[in-house]
Image (tube, rainbow, N blue to C red):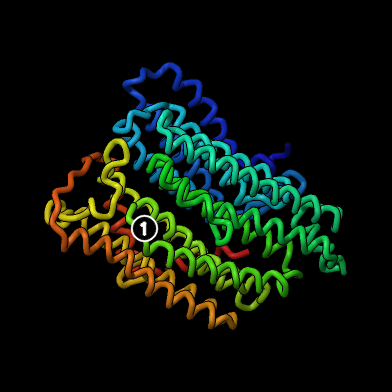
Amino acid sequence: MTQTDFYILLPLTVLTVWACVLLLVDLFIPKDRKGITAFLAALGLAVTLGFTVTQIGREGTGFNGMVTLDGFSTFINVLILVSGLFGIALAYGYIKRMGIDRGEYYTLMLFSITGMMLMAQAADLIIVFLALELLSIPLYVLAAFARPNLQSEEAGVKYFLLGAFATGFVVYGTALVFGATGTTSFSGIFFAASNGTSSLLLTIGAALLLVGFGFKVAAVPFHMWTPDVYQGAPTAVTAFMSSGAKIAGFAALLRVFATAFPSLSADITNVLWALAALTMIVGNITAITQTNIKRLLAYSSIAHAGYILMAFVPYGNKEVMPVSIAAGLFYLVSYAVTNFGSWGVVIALEKAEGRGLEISDYAGLAKKYPALALAMTVFMLSFIGFPPTLGMVGKFYLFRAAIAGGYSGLAIIGVVTSLVSAYYYLRVVVNMYMREGDPTIEREPWLNFATAATAIITVGLSFVPQWLFLLASTAVF
């Protein structure tokens, strides 16, 4: 290992070592004081975030070109680490209340985050596979963390089986790409494809990789696991999973296809167009019939995967691609912030044994807890894309990029499905403000802080979004 290798993976190394030490330290922390473990986990993420920030503006490759450091990986890693901090804030009081306050929860989170960060820095398909497994295996365990709750155990098994199935596609696709090009390096694949190696084997391999990533980001028709896993898993796990795993999955999808397979853009673009359109349509229409808030947000997550996919459709267009990638990164930030906030409200209302998770349970929330109802209204409007919210600005950038790339039809589908989504998002608002009820909430300081902070960011950044978009623009490779 050279000094350059060490520096490129320094934040990831720090977090991995921290997670291993935390696993041992937790053995000596009393069961009634697991908050110490949560604090140490958050401290580890903060320290790692500090090291990551010092890498802004630095570029390089390490381990014989298998990992890379650039603006894109730094941007994604900062977003993932901040998401991890929000994930701990949401989980701190929740797992105590649900009787699942075990220290390994936070260690599993840290290991999953290291996998997400490695995914963002991968420059070789072998590293993509390793990162995919490292981020996924802890999530399988976390989904079943509420044992012996049968719904949680079922969620863990379903996620594991379908996740392993998706990983199989990635491995097989990697094998076919290696057979066609003789390398698994992104730059090597690009070089081979640019010099005439455009075989059917390479195209099939790329298609299988797309299927594997489609499962990870919950794109239609690879979304079947999402509603059941989101509903059965502990809500704090669902919140973290729906943001972190999606960010990492899209980071890998974008880097792999933009750097390794631009020569296949003529074939892949049409497939991405269809995936984005289907995901937006199916996610939004199916969400209309949901009465459980967790299933509603699960289908919402699917729909937003379709919106984010819009940014990747023009990846073969060198003129439009920088703006399109920046729009996708901006929307990832918008979605993550809004998503954590909405799940924070869900956690505040949830009771033991799955009570408080029906949309009807939100009746009367505005009268009894006006601040919480206002925050939830902000998140629902942001999901729709209604001003003044960050979601509105994000969708504007996405639709503008799609139109600039010549995909006006896809932008129209995005606008129409956003209008459709207004029905089920506003149904939550209607219940809070126009229905009589007597809801009760859990008052937890860190949960309240996370919910308030995300609500303020969702509205505040919508007035000054330019700096965030410029920051995303500098992350384009």
Q: Amino acid at mark 1?
A: Gln
Above or below for 149 versus 236: above
Q: Which residue is mark 1?
A: 290
How far across and down, in percent of the image, does residue 155 sit? 48, 41
Residue 221 visible in the picture: yes
Which sits in the foreground, 241 or 68?
A: 241
Q: Where is residue 389 shown, x and y percent of the image?
A: 33, 67
Question: Which quadrant of the figure has residue 253?
Answer: bottom right
- Kindly identify the residue that appears in the image at 67 percent across and 48 percent down: 128
Q: How many marks?
A: 1
Locate residue 404, reporting x and y percent. Answer: 56, 82
Residue 53 visible in image: no
Q: Quadrant of residue 114?
A: top right
Q: Secondary structure at mark 1?
A: loop
The picture places residue 319, in percent across and down from the top left corner, at 63, 78
| Residue at the spot 65% in from the left edge and 69% down from the top edge | 271
Other-residue count near label 1 (Cα within 10 Å), few / some / many at <14 / 14–19 / ≥20: some
Q: Is residue 471 left or right of residue 366?
A: right
Taking the image as shown, residue 248 lies to the left or right of residue 414, namely right
User: Looking at the image, is 65 positioned above or below residue 205?
Assistant: above
Quadrant (top left, top right, bottom left, bottom right) of the C terminus = bottom right
Near-viewer residue (115 or 175)? 175
**Where does the N terminus fall, quadrant-wise?**
top right
Picture residue at 43% right of the left edge, 69% below the top: 394
Q: Is residue 388 left or right of residue 199?
A: left
Is residue 391 depicted above or below 23 in this figure? below
Identify whether 274 is placed above or below 151: below
Foreground of the two, 334 or 372: 372
**Residue beneath the point at 22% across and 64% down:** 430
Give the camera-side residue of 357 and 47: 357
